[in-house]
Amino acid sequence: MDDLPTDDDEDLLPMDAAASVTAPSYARARDPIELLVKVKSEGMRLDHYLQIFIQDFSRSELQKAIAGGHILVNGRASKASYKVRNDDQLFVQLPEPIHDVIIPENIPLDVLYEDEWLAIINKPSNMVVHPARGNWTGTLANALAFRFAEALSRENGTFRPGIVHRLDRDTSGVILIAKEDRTHREVSLQFEKRTVHKEYVALTAGVLDRDSDYIEAAMKHHPHEREKMIVADASDPEAKPACSYYEVMERFRGYTLVKVQPRTGRTHQIRVHLLHAGCPVLADKMYGSRNRVLRSDIVPHLPLDQDEELLGRQALHAFRLRFKHPRRGVWIEAEAPLPPDIRRVLDTLREHRPLR
């Protein structure tokens, strides 16, 4: 799991927000900008507030500029989440906007739903969502650029076209794509308010005792391995609250098939919470002891010539996504069937590891 981007729709801003600052409604990014916050804009996030006036920077680029000290609040560096106050003085000195170019690639996509405003994709495992260091091609973003061309939102920057939320590289399943910016902002607000219903299916190493339960455990980055997350004491200033609800679907000897509904959207949340419950996601190399499942791991006394790999990645699948369509006003629900590798493991467990 990843933290979800959040954006307010422009219709939700105060009607006279633009009149509450001492600046034109649009400024070129290289020109220094001085803004004076008025009472009617009090309480807005700093990055949301700046989007009203700086139109050639995406929200993600503004967040990087804030983190880089290019934007000062009352003469001091601040955070993107800072809530502006009446009479705050903002000084903005931004670099030239970055316009990265995604290379379109003809990678087949399993489109579960599509209309003029958004699309829902069944992402395969072993696919990174957007380009990053070490993964510049073969990503979902490259495939989207080919499939939808320019009909994608740029709300998260030109290097993440249409990307509303993310899935881990080896997590398969449902992912939502926005085709234009307003839809992106409105559906992101639903993620922020936690009105989007997300349901995952996982196979775990170990048997969960309870048929259903909440896992409430705050999380933070590992102090030495920053790509990893760990459970932390809620009083830790670096910890963020996290909650997951699970229901056991099927038990086997030594394994569990479980449905998980994350109530928050922390990075690697399901993987860390199931590990915390004593049943890590099967074949999760980062949080477990192995990165694959062989038939011989399940079937006792299997002849060597009959062995094979059943699963070569973490057994986690984004099964269902339900949200209110921001344009049509109806509830949309999309499901992605379990992929063949997880089904292979399930079939083998049902045959050789059933509970008696």
Image (cartoon, rainbow, N blue to C red):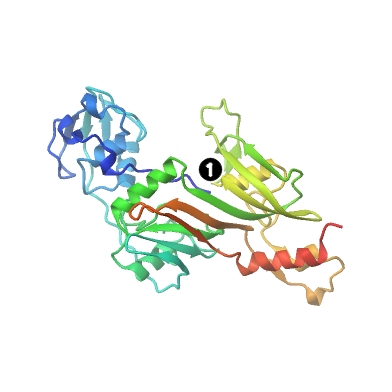
The structure residue drawn at horizontal position 63% and vertical position 43%, both measured from the top left corner, is 273
Residue 119 visible from this viewpoint: yes
Q: Position of residue 109 (x, y in %)?
A: 45, 70
Q: Secondary structure at mark 1?
A: loop
Q: Position of residue 132 (x, y in %)?
A: 42, 56
Q: Nearer the viewer, residue 169 or 321?
A: 321
Is 144 situated left or right of 92 in this image? right
Where does label 1 land, which residue? 226
Is 329 situated left or right of 321 in this image? left
The structure residue drawn at horizontal position 26% and vertical position 34%, both measured from the top left corner, is 71
Q: Position of residue 43 (x, y in %)?
A: 31, 28
Is 192 situated left or right of 215 in this image? left
Amino acid type at mark 1: Arg
Q: Position of residue 5 (x, y in %)?
A: 40, 45
Note whether 11 is above or below 148 in the view shown. above
Note whether 354 is above or below 91 in the view shown. below
Dot 1 crowding, Cα within 10 Å, few <14, some 14–19, many 20+: few
Note whether 123 is above or below 157 in the view shown. below
Q: Quadrant of the C terminus?
A: bottom right
Q: Nearer the viewer, residue 318 or 206?
A: 318
Residue 167 visible from this viewpoint: no
Spot the residue most to the left. Answer: 24
The structure residue drawn at horizontal position 30% and vertical position 32%, both measured from the top left corner, is 44
